[in-house]
Structure formats: structure tokens, C-alpha cells
Image: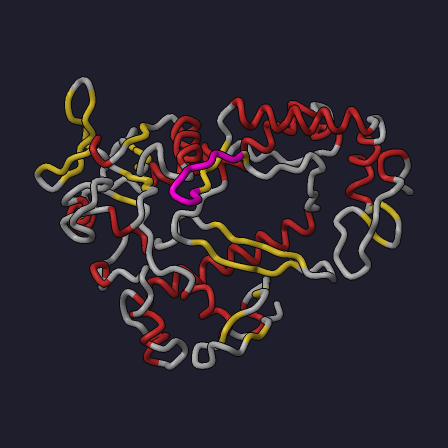
């Protein structure tokens, strides 16, 4: 299939991977999209793009960029030409990420307990203990179900030969999923027939899956545990995401001042009195979580909440070691991960960068 109309002047860089074109022809997965777009002229396409931008702004689908002490609201980057991942490609990505997260979870369990990876000389001790995200307060603490990575955001890039690589592992309650959900809704509005025609998988079940997982973490045996999303407040750059996830899951969005600790349990203040909280999906940084353990001047957290967690009376999605964990997998056998790293730094030679094949 050759391009016509809108795409007549489309330029393909031979040194990069082009998602839509191969050998000057449209890839099979893009044929339906191109046929749909060919029905529009350039003015209509520009109007669609302007409509999308207005929808993002009017619905508050923004994030805050702080510059010179001033907060600037920006809409999330949006391309009206969708990027298509085929079912085969997604199966490969899903298998690789699943395997990788299992390894990262085991790594976090190890560095907070037996530390075999340090004793065996795979990772230098200084690399762990100097990491600002390593919480000595949680050393030798057994987390529920041995799950250290409840939610992860994996950044992928594509090489010029089409191979997917992992750029970064974000394990500390990553942001961005709400924008994916809203992106899909905007696509539905500006191109209402495109998704059904191309048999695109839905993503709208994410809030249901997330809520189900949070329910399963409740320390109390109750059919309807109390779940809250803990946010730093309206000035946080990801506040839109906090509100969106709380709304879609049907749970309360709370700030630290909405919670208190009493008799080794966490309670939420409501108009009808105190309500015990079972699970906290928290979006507050470690340093500000509990002024009795971390920063004494924090007004965002709840004093005593770490002690409640240690006693097993509340389950929270806590942040732990940051980027350190992702690079330890570079030393695993080559066939142990389905996805390779885009590049990594040797632990003992920080200036030597090397790529890791999948």
C-alpha cells in the first residue's frame, strides 16, 4: 500500500525505525489507520489536533512544570497519529517485563534481607547504602506477600532495527497511567470509528485491576476494605493523576491532614467520625511520609504511620530502592531477560557504558 493525499510528502529517515513505513510502503498494521486518515484533508486534521488540545485543557488533563518558582500547567504531549503495537510485539514486551519485574522484586527482597547480591560481589555495598531511596528503617522488615513492586512504570525505546530496549525501571509509584487512559478517551472522541475498525485492545479495565489488587492487600479480612489514595495535595505536578485514579477506583483521595494514627491503626476523618484505613496507595515521597521517622518538618505525611505499617495494621504501596535495582540485571545471564537494557554503567567503572543485548 502506497501513501496518497496527506502523506505524499512524508519523509522517512533511513537511519531510524519508522513505525508506519518499511521499504517505502505502509506497514500492515498501519494500513487501516492510513485509509481512515486519507478521508481527511490537512485542514480537517489540524482541526482534530486543535480539538484534542482543547479537550485536554478544558478537562484539566495537565501536569505542572515548575520553573523559576512558578507552576505552569501544560497539557500532556499528544499525537493524533497513534503508535501501533502489534499483538506479537506486545506479547514479547509483556513477557519480558513480567520476567524483569519478578527479578527486580527478588532483588529488593534480597537487599532488605540477606543481601546475597552484595556478599557475592555482584553489587557493591556502597551502591546500595549510598542510594538516597534505600530505607534503612525497613531493613529486615517482611512485607506482605513478599511483594515489593506493586506498580511499575517501564520506559521503553526502540532501536533503529526495531528492537525494543528498556531505558529505565520506575518502581517508586510511577506517574503517567491516567494520561494513557485519557489519551484513549480523546482518541475515541476525535476519531470515533478508528479503534473499532482496527480491533484495538481496551485499556479501560486498568482502574478495576488496580482496585482489585489493592483490595487483595488488605490486612483485615473484610469484603470491603477501606482504600485511600494519599496525595501531597493540589500543588503536586501529578495531582491530576491522583484525582483521576481515586475517582475511577471509587476510593477516597486524602492528604496527610485527613488521616491520623490511634492505637496503632490509621484512621480517616469523615463527617460521620473516624474510619479505619486498610490500604494506602500513597503518592507522597518517603522523606515526607512520617515526620516521626523521616523529615521532622513534613506537613504532608502522618506521624506514626510507619509504625502502623510495621505492625501489619495497614498496607501501603511504599517506595524503596530506586534506579540501583534496574542495573543489577545487567549482570544476569544473557538469556535471563527477554528485554535488554538500552545501556548501563559498570558498577566499578562509572564512565564505561555498554549496551546489554536481550
From this viewpoint, which residue is outermost toward the left? 263
- Which is more toward the observer, 59 or 313? 59
Check if residue 67 falls in the magenta segment.
Answer: yes
- Which is more toward the observer, 79 or 172? 79
Residue 149 in the image, given as x and y percentages of width and height:
39, 53
Looking at the image, residue 91 sits to the left or right of residue 31; the answer is left
The magenta-colored residue range is 66-74
Residue 316 occupies quadrant: top left
Q: Check the image and report above or below for 343 versus 265.
A: below
Q: Residue at x 59, y 39 (%)?
A: 77
> Can the viewer see residue 255?
yes
Q: Residue at x 52, y 33 (%)?
A: 205
Residue 2 occupies quadrant: top right
- Which is more toward the observer, 210 or 81? 81
Q: Check the image and report above or below for 2 versus 248.
A: below
Residue 79 occupies quadrant: top right
Check if residue 187 falls in the magenta segment.
Answer: no
Q: Check the image and report above or below for 325 versus 188.
A: below
Q: Check the image and report above or below for 102 versus 288.
A: below
Residue 296 in the image, given as x and y percentages of width and height:
16, 50
Looking at the image, residue 85 sits to the left or right of residue 204; the answer is right
**Magenta: predominant secondary structure element?**
strand
Residue 118 in the image, given as x and y percentages of width and height:
34, 76
Q: Quadrant of the N terminus?
A: top right
Amino acid at each position: 500500500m502506497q501513501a496518497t493525499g496527506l502523506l505524499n510528502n512524508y519523509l522517512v529517515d533511513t537511519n531510524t525505525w519508522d513505525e508506519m513505513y518499511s521499504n517505502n510502503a505502509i506497514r500492515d498494521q498501519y494500513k487501516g489507520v492510513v485509509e481512515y486518515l486519507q478521508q481527511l484533508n490537512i485542514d480537517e486534521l489540524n482541526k482534530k489536533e486543535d480539538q484534542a488540545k482543547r479537550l485536554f485543557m478544558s478537562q484539566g488533563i495537565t501536569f505542572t512544570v515548575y520553573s523559576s518558582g512558578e507552576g505552569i500547567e501544560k497539557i500532556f504531549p499528544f499525537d493524533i497519529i497513534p503508535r501501533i503495537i502489534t499483538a506479537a510485539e506486545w506479547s514479547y514486551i509483556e513477557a519480558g517485563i513480567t520476567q524483569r519485574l519478578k527479578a527486580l522484586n527478588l532483588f529488593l527482597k534480597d537487599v532488605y534481607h540477606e543481601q546475597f547480591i552484595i556478599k557475592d560481589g555482584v553489587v557493591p555495598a556502597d551502591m546500595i547504602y549510598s542510594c538516597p531511596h534505600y530505607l534503612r528503617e525497613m531493613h529486615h522488615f517482611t512485607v506482605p506477600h513478599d511483594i515489593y513492586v506493586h506498580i511499575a512504570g517501564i520506559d521503553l525505546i526502540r532501536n533503529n532495527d526495531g528492537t525494543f530496549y528498556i531505558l529505565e525501571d520506575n518502581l517508586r509509584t510511577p506517574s503517567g497511567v491516567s494520561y494513557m487512559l485519557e489519551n484513549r478517551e480523546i482518541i475515541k472522541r476525535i476519531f470515533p470509528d478508528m479503534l473499532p475498525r482496527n480491533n484495538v485492545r481496551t485499556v479501560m479495565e486498568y482502574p478495576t485491576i488496580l482496585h482489585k489488587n489493592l483490595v487483595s492487600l488488605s490486612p483485615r479480612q473484610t469484603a470491603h476494605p477501606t482504600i485511600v489514595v494519599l496525595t501531597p495535595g493540589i500543588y503536586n505536578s501529578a495531582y491530576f493523576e491522583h484525582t483521576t485514579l481515586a475517582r475511577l477506583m471509587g476510593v477516597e483521595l486524602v492528604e496527610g491532614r485527613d488521616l491520623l494514627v490511634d492505637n496503632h491503626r490509621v484512621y480517616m476523618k469523615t463527617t460521620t467520625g473516624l474510619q479505619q484505613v486498610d490500604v494506602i496507595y500513597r503518592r507522597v515521597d518517603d522523606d515526607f511520609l512520617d515526620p516521626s521517622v523521616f523529615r521532622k518538618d513534613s506537613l504532608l505525611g502522618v506521624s506514626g504511620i510507619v509504625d502502623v505499617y510495621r505492625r501489619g495494621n495497614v498496607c501501603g504501596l511504599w517506595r524503596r530502592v530506586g534506579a540501583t535495582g534496574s542495573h543489577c540485571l545487567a549482570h544476569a545471564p544473557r538469556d535471563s531477560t527477554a528485554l535488554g537494557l538500552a545501556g548501563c554503567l559498570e558498577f566499578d567503572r562509572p564512565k564505561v557504558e555498554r549496551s546489554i543485548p536481550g
